[in-house]
């Protein structure tokens, strides 16, 4: 479990699955993701069985000190040879814009660089997700490329932008 500035990240447990499923199925969440498939309770339970045994991925529930569910965060594609990994987070729609994302990414970056000892952290984001891009740049991520017209939303193709931060750039 990690705590920073009244935000807590703890590993996902079985009793978190319905909160995660509802967040994932919220259109304001899935419309900004690579995968738009909605989840059933059965799918969610199978997903949880799979991630519990995957050493290259860690999923966290984001809460406050009252244990209110705020969102989800993940570390994925952990590459111990090349010392890199990917990050991601989704915050409940009603809690967005309150600085929670910044706190979550602060925790994830600290853990990645200071404890997992990776050299490179990366993420991908839809070009249209300007709030997330603003946050990533504020956190020190640098754009390193794009997957042109990789995501189809609302009748048009959108670029998927790639960002990264190196350990030497981490503050």
Image (cartoon, helix red, strand yellow):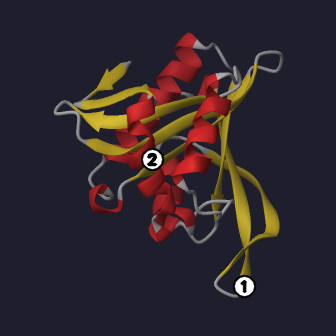
Q: Please tell me whether residue 127 is drawn above or below residue 117 in the rendered image.
A: below
What is the crowding at mark 2: few (fewer than 14 residues within 10 Å), some, or many (at least 20)? many
Look at mark 1 in the image and give the residue it sits on: 156
Residue receiving disc 2: 20
SS at circle 1: strand
Which sits earlier in the primary sequence, circle 2 or circle 1? 2
Marks counted in the figure total 2
Q: Eyeballing the image, is 62 above or below 81?
A: below
Mark 1: few/some/many CA within 10 Å (<14, 14-19, 20+) = few
- Give the residue drawn at x 65%, y 28%: 57
Q: What element does badge 2 sit on?
A: helix
Give how far across and how far down residue 116 sits, in percent: 61, 14
Residues marked 2 and 1 touching at CB (< 8 Å): no
Closer-to-camera residue (163/40) = 40
Say which quarter of the image contains residue 141.
Answer: top right
Residue 129 in view of the camera: yes
Q: Splitting the image into 4 quarters, where does residue 152 fall?
A: bottom right
Instruction: From the viewer's side, name the closer residue of 139 and 21.
Output: 21
């Amino acid at each position: 479990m990690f705590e920073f500035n009244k935000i807590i990240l703890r590993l996902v447990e079985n009793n978190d699955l319905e909160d995660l499923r509802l967040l994932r199925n919220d259109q304001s969440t899935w419309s900004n993701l690579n995968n738009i498939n909605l989840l059933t309770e059965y799918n969610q339970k199978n997903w949880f069985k799979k991630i519990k045994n995957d050493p290259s991925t860690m999923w966290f529930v984001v809460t406050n000190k009252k244990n209110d569910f705020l969102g989800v965060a993940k570390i994925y594609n952990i590459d111990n040879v090349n010392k890199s990994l990917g990050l991601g987070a989704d915050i409940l729609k009603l809690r967005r814009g309150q600085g929670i994302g910044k706190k979550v990414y602060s925790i994830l970056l600290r853990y990645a660089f200071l404890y997992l000892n990776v050299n490179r952290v990366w993420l991908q984001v839809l070009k249209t997700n300007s709030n997330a891009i603003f946050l990533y740049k504020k956190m020190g991520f640098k754009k390193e490329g794009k997957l042109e017209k990789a995501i189809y939303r609302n009748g048009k193709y959108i670029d998927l932008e790639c960002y990264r931060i190196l350990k030497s750039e981490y503050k």
